Image (tube, rainbow, N blue to C red):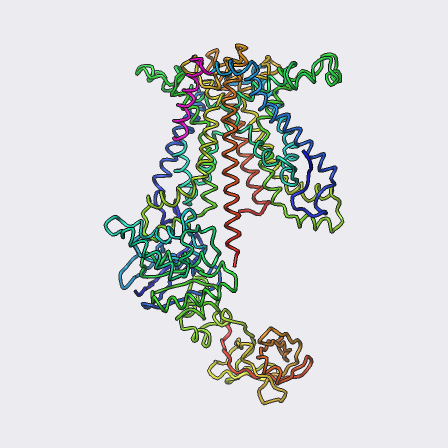
């Protein structure tokens, strides 16, 4: 089922949580709402679910306005950040809850409920925990039970609030892949909220980057990473070097070197370069930036070099292990830097 | 801002409406009756009722004994909380549970038990009677405990015993060991650590416990009247004054004294709320 | 006491053994003098003249009437305050509205008021000279010096117990589980009965048990409104007072021992509930950080 978000605004007192948000979510899509804390992503998710009311705007499910519909009638699946499992019920009863509270006419029979719950527990690979209580489960297990419970009511839409936020790194990575596989199996329109760019890029079909209550960019992981629409998106999606300079006839000068900025107007500008998109050389070429290696840090598979660039602060350069040993770089050496890809944003006057 | 923030949970009107209705019926309306009843009296009558020498004597006894009892509990409450949090000894869980006894034991039961124990021929009182070694320290009469103002202090100490313990205990348990280790590594002695690190942290809780105990002691009736002896100008407490006015059908007099007590209660309630707010802020909660 | 040791503390953060002994000894001495000996003495005095006289104290019709009245009073007052407590906690812990903190403070008000004043306010409302006195007399309804007055005074003094227990509990639990139930399609009442109530049942029991102890043991407030009519308007605490003033110490302490027993049961249940919730929280923490 598709979701249309139209002109949604929400404020808490004087704080603007969401400012006129417009977004279309295609049927069967897995969408990530990405942004720093306080950007409004959780509020937007809760408005879609009906847990919060927007001050203005509409939420359309499959073209139908749901704004007036109470949360209990929206048929959404919602996975809470801290799972919100019913602590006094067994895992089985938790998953069965949504079926048991249906009105008599539509409530499935006891055998049907049993079959359905076990089917879901098998889907999340935790059938053997059916008789446990939530307090007896590990964090990762609680997460999967919360998901099974949300799926039990056959929702049209699945909403997940920081689904991996409370888990440690290893469990997080496992569950991430598992959620992606699960989505490919059931193909349910799904939206999840996260502040972790790696998570969003790995799992989602499309990423929505939010900042201070408005949308910075919507696009596939490749789009938002390779062609960030704003400095905010560029910085939020990974490490970055910034060069403050002035563009003149398609070139931005940094010390004795210069960086190409073909489409930028002649004005002060900020140039963004990712550390792993810089080539190092001992041979001076026409435009390369001059610098001296100041620090070398070995971070496992990659090596990070800190280079003091003439006319600028230190610049970080990341090399793969092979390229680092091929180069045989040493601290104190003079080097020449050539950015492979850059983004130029005109500086606000 | 609207009266109420939006929420998807139902039942706000019903639950709030019923709460306010019931609160008004049981608490607010009757208290309002007390206040308006005092307006039947003119100022001169009101003043003479509340400043009658025998009544003034009860204020002194009530406030004095309450203050002393709260003070005793400030010290022993800290001691008990300290021992319960920091040390372990056999039967600790039982002692911990028993600290709440004064909250659970009806005041009349406490009253007759304490009066019997501390009477000159009681289990405890006999050690302080005339002619005994301890009694002789206090002169030929010994140290009579029951049926004296000191008996009031004993009863109030019992009744208010849990307050300081229960406000200090959680705060003491929350003090990180690292804090003391840090002070120790900086060269502080054990006593300096207690005085300069622990005590300031406990101060808001100690004050809150003290005021709760004091407030409770002022209104206490049941446990006191059995042990007090109730001698006019000497060991009568203010709540007893209200009862004796009522027994003489002096409703106006009883009301006037009750209003004074109520005002004191309100002031103390505000002070306690202020203290709790301060202590929450100090501890970085909320 | 065989030994005093410290609870998981490094040498730098505890006291010398003799200081620990001294402090523990002083604390236990104080507790013995003020808590244990008075408690033991109640049972000792009750049984001083043997089991026969002790048992005979309860066959006295006035004592039986007092026990019955006490049970009736608690059976009315406690459920009333239970319903109020749940309603107030729902409104205060689940919604943000203007005047919320004022309401919370007002709920505590009865704890701040002297029991004697609590009794007096009902005399001023319903007594012969009170606001409604003439109207009540006309319709031949007796509240003061009768059972309704006793119940009202008891309701007043036990008013805050349940609400006070539930408000912080429900605030700590948050409303995520209720939200989850609503998302899963449950109605408001289904959410309340199936999610909220099971989650607060131990806190509810805790509040009820404390309110009940106070309701059965209240002396000051009830004393003002009761009129002390033997066999009619005496509760157990008032009956204890009468027997004590008549120098019938065995009878007084026998009835008192009944109330002391109630206090001990109350403390036992209270400790059990606290122990249980601490254990569950510990278990929850342990498992959540597993893997």
Asked if C113 appears above or below B193 in the picture, the reply is above
Direction from residue B56 to residue A266 in the image, left or right: left
The rendered magenta stretch, by its main secondary structure, is classed as helix
Q: Position of residue B64 (x, y in %)?
A: 63, 23
Q: Nearer the viewer, residue C152 or A342?
A: C152
Give the quarter of the image for residue A187.
bottom left
Q: Position of residue B66 (x, y in %)?
A: 60, 25
Q: Where is residue B133 in the image (x, y as percent from the top left)?
A: 75, 17
Does residue B148 appear anywhere in the picture?
A: no
Q: Nearer the viewer, residue B37 or C37?
A: C37
Does residue B152 appear anywhere in the picture?
A: yes
Asked if B157 appears above or below A343 in the picture, the reply is above
Asked if A344 appears above or below B193 in the picture, the reply is below
How many labels, in total?
Answer: 0
Direction from residue A241 to residue C228 in the image, left or right: left
Q: Position of residue C285 (x, y in %)?
A: 52, 51
Q: Nearer the viewer, residue C161 or B200?
A: C161
Provide the residue span drawn in magenta: C58-80
Q: Which residue is drawn at 41% across and 63% down?
A: A192
Membership of C78 in magenta stretch: yes
Membership of A74 in magenta stretch: no
Q: Which of B60 and C153 is in front in this view?
A: C153
The quadrant in which the N terminus of chain A is found is bottom left
């Amino acid at each position: 089922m598709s979701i249309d978000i139209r002109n949604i605004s929400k404020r808490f007192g004087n704080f603007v949580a969401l400012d006129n948000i417009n977004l279309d979510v295609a049927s069967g899509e897995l969408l990530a709402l990405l942004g720093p804390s306080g950007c409004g992503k959780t509020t937007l998710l809760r408005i879609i679910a009906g847990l919060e009311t927007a001050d203005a705007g509409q939420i359309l499910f499959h073209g139908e306005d749901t704004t007036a519909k109470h949360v209990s009638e929206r048929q959404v699946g919602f996975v809470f950040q801290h799972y919100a499992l019913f602590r006094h019920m067994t895992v089985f009863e938790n998953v069965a809850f949504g079926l048991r509270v249906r009105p008599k006419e539509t409530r499935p029979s006891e055998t049907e409920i049993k079959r359905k719950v076990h089917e879901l527990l098998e889907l999340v690979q935790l059938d053997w925990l059916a008789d446990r209580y939530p307090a007896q489960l590990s964090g990762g297990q609680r997460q999967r039970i919360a998901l099974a419970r949300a799926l039990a009511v056959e929702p049209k839409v699945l909403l997940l609030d920081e689904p991996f936020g409370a888990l440690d790194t290893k469990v997080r990575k496992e569950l991430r892949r598992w959620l992606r596989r699960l989505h490919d199996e059931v193909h349910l329109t799904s939206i999840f909220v996260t502040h972790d760019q790696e998570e969003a890029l790995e799992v989602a079909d499309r990423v929505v980057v939010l900042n201070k209550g408005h949308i910075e960019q919507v696009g596939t992981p490749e789009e938002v990473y390779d062609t960030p629409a704003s400095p905010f998106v560029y910085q939020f999606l990974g490490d970055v070097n910034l060069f403050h300079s002035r563009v003149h006839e398609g070139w931005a000068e940094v010390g004795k070197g210069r960086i190409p900025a073909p489409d930028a107007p002649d004005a002060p500008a900020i140039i963004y370069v990712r550390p792993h998109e810089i080539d190092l050389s001992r041979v001076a070429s026409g435009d390369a930036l001059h610098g001296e290696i100041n620090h070398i840090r070995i971070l496992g598979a990659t090596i990070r070099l800190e280079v003091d660039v003439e006319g600028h602060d230190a610049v970080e350069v990341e090399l793969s292990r092979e390229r680092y040993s091929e180069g045989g770089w040493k601290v104190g050496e003079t080097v020449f830097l050539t950015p492979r890809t850059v983004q130029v944003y005109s500086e606000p006057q | 801002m609207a009266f109420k923030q939006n929420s998807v949970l139902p039942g706000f009107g019903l639950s709030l409406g019923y709460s306010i209705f019931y609160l008004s019926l049981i608490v607010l309306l009757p208290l309002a009756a007390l206040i308006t009843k005092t307006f039947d009296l003119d100022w001169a009558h009101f003043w003479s009722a509340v400043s009658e020498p025998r009544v003034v004597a009860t204020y002194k006894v009530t406030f004095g004994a309450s203050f002393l009892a709260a003070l005793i509990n400030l010290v022993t409450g800290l001691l008990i909380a300290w021992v319960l949090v920091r040390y372990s000894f056999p039967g600790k869980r039982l002692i911990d549970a028993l600290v709440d006894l004064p909250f659970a034991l009806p005041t009349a039961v406490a009253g007759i038990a304490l009066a019997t124990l501390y009477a000159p021929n009681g289990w405890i009182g006999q050690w302080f009677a005339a002619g005994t070694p301890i009694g002789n320290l206090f002169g030929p009469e010994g140290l009579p405990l029951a049926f004296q103002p000191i008996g009031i202090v004993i009863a109030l100490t019992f009744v208010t015993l849990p307050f300081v313990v229960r406000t200090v205990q959680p705060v003491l348990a929350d003090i990180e060991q690292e804090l003391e280790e840090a002070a120790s590594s900086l060269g502080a002695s054990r006593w300096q650590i207690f005085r300069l690190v622990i005590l300031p942290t406990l101060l808001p809780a100690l004050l809150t416990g003290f005021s709760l105990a004091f407030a409770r002691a002022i209104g206490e009736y049941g446990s006191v009247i059995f042990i007090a002896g109730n001698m006019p100008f000497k060991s009568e407490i203010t709540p007893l004054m209200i009862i004796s006015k009522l027994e003489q059908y002096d409703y106006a007099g009883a009301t006037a004294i009750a209003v004074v007590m109520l005002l004191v209660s309100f002031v103390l309630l505000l002070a306690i709320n202020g203290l709790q707010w301060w202590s929450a802020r100090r501890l970085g909660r909320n | 006491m065989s030994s005093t040791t410290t609870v998981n503390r490094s040498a730098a953060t505890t006291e010398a053994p003799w200081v620990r002994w001294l402090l523990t000894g002083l604390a236990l001495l104080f507790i013995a003098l003020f808590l244990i000996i008075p408690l033991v003495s109640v049972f000792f005095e009750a049984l001083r003249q043997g089991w026969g006289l002790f048992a005979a104290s309860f066959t006295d019709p006035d004592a039986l009437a007092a026990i019955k009245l006490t049970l009736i009073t608690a059976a009315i007052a406690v459920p009333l305050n239970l319903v109020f407590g749940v309603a107030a906690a729902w409104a205060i812990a689940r919604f943000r509205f203007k005047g919320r903190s004022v309401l919370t403070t007002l709920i505590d008000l009865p704890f701040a008021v002297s029991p004697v004043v609590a009794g007096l306010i009902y005399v001023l409302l319903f007594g012969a000279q009170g606001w409604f006195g003439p109207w009540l007399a006309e319709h031949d309804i007796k509240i003061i010096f009768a059972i309704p007055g006793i119940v009202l005074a008891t309701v007043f003094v036990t008013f805050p117990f349940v609400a006070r227990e539930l408000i912080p509990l429900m605030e700590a639990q948050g409303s995520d589980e209720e939200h989850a139930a609503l998302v899963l399609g449950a109605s408001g009442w289904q959410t309340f009965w199936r999610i909220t109530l099971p989650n607060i049942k131990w806190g509810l029991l805790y509040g009820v048990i404390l309110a009940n102890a106070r309701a059965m043991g209240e002396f000051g407030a009830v004393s003002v409104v009761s009129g002390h009519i033997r066999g009619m308007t005496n509760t157990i605490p008032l009956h204890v007072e009468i027997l004590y003033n008549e120098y019938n110490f065995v009878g007084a302490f026998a009835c008192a021992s009944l109330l002391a027993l109630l206090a001990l049961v109350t403390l036992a249940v209270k400790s059990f509930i606290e122990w249980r919730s601490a254990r569950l929280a510990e278990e929850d923490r342990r498992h959540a950080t597993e893997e």
